[in-house]
Image (spheres, helix red, strand yellow):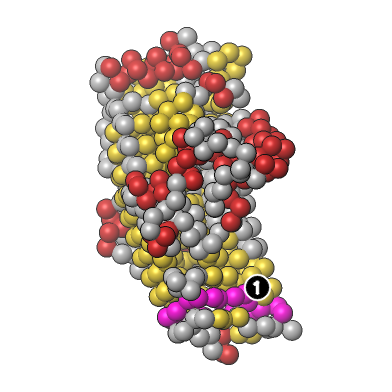
Amino acid sequence: MKIHSILLYITLLGLTFSCKEKNAEVKDSQNSQNSAPSWVSKVGASPLTFNSKAYSVNTYGAVNDGSALTTEAIQKAIDECAKNGGGTVFFEPGIYLSGSIFIKEGVHFRIDKGVEIRGSQNIADYKEINTRIAGVEMKWPAALINVRNENNVLIDGDGLVNGEGKVFWDYYWDLRKNDYEPRSLRWIVDYDAKRPRTFLISNAKNVFLKDLNIQKAGFWTVQVLYSEHITVDGLTIRNNIGGHGPSTDGIDIDSSRYILVQNCDIDCNDDNFCLKAGRDWDGLRVNRPTEYVVIRDCIARAGSGLVTLGSETSGSIRHVYASNIKGLGTKNGLNIKSATTRGGTVEDIYLENIQMDSVRTFMEVSMNWNPTYSYSKLPEEFDPEEIPVHWKKMLNKVEPESKGIPHFKNITLRNIQVKGAKKAINVKGLESSTVEQITLDNVHIEAETAGDIQYSKNWSLTNVSLDAEDGLPLTIENSPGVIFPASTYSSNK
């Protein structure tokens, strides 16, 4: 098998886009030029060239009928490739049962059509590592496929990465409903019910994750953590096969910078595209922002957020540009969420050329999101000295209290078309922290009801229409400078 050197060339955002056929409908509907900020050209990984040597995992003893765990053989091929200056690691067609594997610098890890990497359903096959989960640094199982503390890596191919997550979904629901919730421990169960992510890119630089089919993640599908100049391109994620897994986010960008996400199609049971930056005391301690992120030419299907910012906002989320995204049955369009113990600022967010159909809410904003999960309280029967370290982190009070108040500002939504929504807008700031400087430009929404705006100020509207089936206008309270003129509204009645 002849393997040639591989040169990846990534063309960043210009006045026109080159995109996959599956996104053509999204892009053809746009009639105006994009308004991308100047920093957009700096995101993503740089072109990579790999050694021409090729290493078959089968040569190292990998079994391709799914009958036996083959983690060690796959890792041997990766290690040998890296030791000899890099190259391509590949698989003969078949099914490969695996626990956690770790990709090294200079390795092109290729998963061709006809190859399925199938995740082990035994949590012991995922090595525990120091990582961050849902905004808290702690010991947690590694992902199925990991790039940790490594640079210059490509993972690609038309094959399948199957997380086989249902056993972990069932474990979580049983632990939550039959143990933790009855003991008033809803706030910690997500951290104690350890489940494997499918991909983790952590403390890495110049990494491509490209053209993969991924399904049934046990937990988050792709987490990009503490990394920079990463490109996630052309992923198809299907996490609702055989059930609806809890917290099966699509792509999570976590305290990372200069990230490009494009040409992805996600069906999941939590946030589709999500940006995070740490939770509460531990997130404020780490204090690393997520910034300079581009999400473009994508489809969000079932899931909680077409673009979600938070709920982990402690290190701040800023400089985000999302364009040419289509939402089909996604719960929320723009979803910004935090809590009064979390802190951080969400700012300089720009969404344009977005189409949404059959969504729950076009614009969902909350600074007091999901209290039973967001706020930690130790029941009296527990000894504070005997609880796990990550419990102590969650219970550590944010001092002073003002550091826990989040701030949302400078958010622009342009060229947005929404139909079949249940609610148009649900924005709830705080008396101590209003949602500020919101711009709606060429935004047209059809919904069952208009919704509510509380504790916000200084909105700018240009060519905005809101067609509410119930004929009622927005309820606007404690929001100076937020005016939706009568001409904004129309009714089908």
Residue located 30% across and 45% down the image: 229
Residue 312 part of the magenta-drawn span? no
Name the main secondary structure of what is drawn in magenta: strand
Q: What residue range appears in magenta?
A: 450-470
What is the residue that sits farthest to the bottom in this orientation? Answer: 486
In-front residue for pair 175/263: 175
Query: Which residue type carries mark 1?
Result: Ala
Residue 469 part of the magenta-drawn span? yes
Q: Position of residue 139 (x, y in %)?
A: 45, 31
Residue located 37% across and 44% down the image: 231
Q: Position of residue 255 (x, y in %)?
A: 37, 47
For residue 268, above or below residue 84: below
Does the image show residue 66?
yes
In-front residue for pair 172/102: 172
Residue linked to disc 1 = 447
Quadrant containing the C terminus in the rendered view? bottom right
